[in-house]
Image (spheres, rainbow, N blue to C red):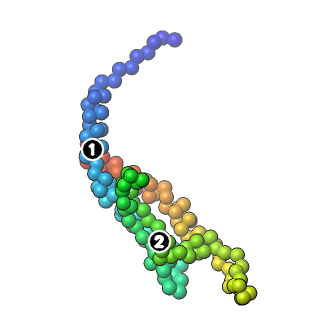
């Protein structure tokens, strides 16, 4: 086979522009565009969860930007259910078998709900696409 050569011109300029764009991306700006996506998921989750006697399961739904540090250097946004406000989420999500008190009193069963899991599977690809588009928009402005 014959020798083939490929020459690319302008790599230095491209490299310089990319470095400039990355430096221009402020982590707070990235979090600013990701937080509305997390808030949208939180609103859908709140609507999907059942309302119990106290309402703590729905009250425990949150969306925030986690604190960045050594263990979490990248900007992000998160949504979920607070374990402090709703420590019973796992019972609602995964259900229980028949339960009995120490005295022998029957406490019933909890049916499987999969509210969080089902919503996450339905919304994950759309949220990922929205996040990519939002960060791409920031990159285009930086270039």
Q: Which mark is residue 104?
A: none
- For the question of whether residue 109 can be seen, the reply is yes
Determine whether, in the image, residue 73 is placed left or right of residue 57.
left
The residue sitting at 45% across, 12% down in the picture is 3
Residue matched to label 1: 23
Q: How many marks?
A: 2
Determine whether, in the image, residue 29 is placed left or right of residue 63.
left
Determine whether 58 is above or below 23 in the image.
below
Determine whether 28 is above or below 141 in the image.
below
The residue sitting at 31% across, 59% down in the picture is 32
Q: Residue 115 occupies which quadrant of the picture?
A: bottom right
Q: Residue 93 occupies which quadrant of the picture?
A: bottom right
Question: Which secondary structure lies at badge 2?
Answer: loop
The x, y position of residue 73, in whole percent, is 38, 51
Residue matched to label 2: 82
The x, y position of residue 137, in whole percent, is 31, 50
| Name of the residue lying farthest toward the top | 2
Question: Which secondary structure lies at badge 1?
Answer: helix
The residue sitting at 42% across, 53% down in the picture is 71
Out of 88 and 9, give the one closest to the viewer: 88
The x, y position of residue 103, in whole percent, is 72, 88
Determine whether 96 is above or below 33 in the image.
below
Whether residues under marks 1 and 2 lie with C-beta atoms below 8 angstroms apart, the answer is no
Sequence-wise, the earlier of marks 1 and 2 is: 1
Give me the C-alpha separation between circle 1 and circle 2.
34 Å
| Name of the residue lying farthest toward the right | 104
Determine whether 3 is above or below 72 in the image.
above
Out of 119 and 88, give the one closest to the viewer: 88
The x, y position of residue 124, in whole percent, is 49, 58
């Amino acid at each position: 086979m014959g020798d083939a050569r490929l020459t690319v011109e302008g790599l230095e300029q491209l490299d310089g522009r990319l470095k400039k764009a990355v430096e221009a991306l402020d982590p707070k700006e990235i979090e600013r565009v990701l937080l509305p996506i997390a808030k949208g998921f939180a609103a859908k989750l709140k609507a999907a969860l059942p309302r119990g006697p106290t309402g703590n399961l729905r009250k425990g739904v949150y969306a925030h930007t986690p604190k960045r540090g050594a263990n979490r250097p990248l900007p992000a946004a998160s949504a979920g259910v607070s374990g402090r406000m709703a420590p019973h989420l796992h019972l609602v999500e995964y259900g229980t078998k028949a339960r009995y008190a120490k005295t022998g009193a029957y406490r019933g069963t909890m049916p499987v709900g999969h509210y969080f899991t089902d919503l996450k599977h339905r919304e994950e690809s759309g949220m990922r696409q929205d996040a990519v588009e939002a960060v791409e928009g920031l990159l285009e402005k930086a270039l």
